[in-house]
Amino acid sequence: MAHKKPNLPEKTCPVCQRPFTWRKKWERDWPQVKYCSERCKRAGKKLM
């Protein structure tokens, strides 16, 4: 059975407009995380 984690912080990706939640790998730099994935990160840089 999967472990439920109800109280994780959440943000909305500016490229795909989908919500994404905190991940352990983002622990130290969560305030700087803007995109949900590398794909959205690359797409966001093309828009600027």
Image (cartoon, rainbow, N blue to C red):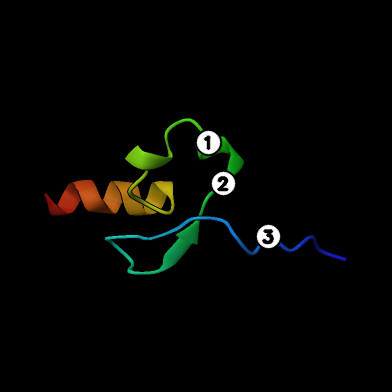
**Residue 6 horizontal side relative to residue 12, left or right:** right
Mark 1 neighbour class, 10 Å CA radius: few under 14, some 14 to 19, many 20 or more: few
Which mark identifies residue 46?
A: none
Query: Which residue is the site of mark 2?
Result: 23
Q: Residue furthest front?
A: 7
- Above-or-below relation of 43 to 33: below
What is the spatial separation of the Cα atoms under label 2 and label 3, in whole angstroms?
Answer: 11 Å
Task: Please report whichever mark, 1 or 3, sits nearer to the chain's N-terminal start.
Answer: 3
Instruction: Name the spot of residue 9 as percent of width and height, x first.
Output: 49, 55
Instruction: Find out whether the residues at labels 2 and 1 contact each other: C-beta distance under 8 Å.
Output: yes
- Residue at x-position 43% and y-position 40%: 30
Residue 36 occupies quadrant: bottom left
Task: Please report whichever mark, 2 or 3, sits nearer to the chain's N-terminal start.
Answer: 3
Mark 3 secondary-structure assignment: loop
Q: Nearer the viewer, mark 2 or mark 3?
A: 3
What is the spatial separation of the Cα atoms under label 1 and label 3, in whole angstroms?
Answer: 15 Å
Q: Amino acid at mark 1?
A: Glu
Which mark identifies residue 27?
A: 1
Query: Which residue is the site of mark 3?
Result: 5
- Above-or-below relation of 45 to 10: above
Mark 2 neighbour class, 10 Å CA radius: few under 14, some 14 to 19, many 20 or more: few
What is the spatial separation of the Cα atoms under label 2 and label 1, in whole angstroms?
Answer: 7 Å
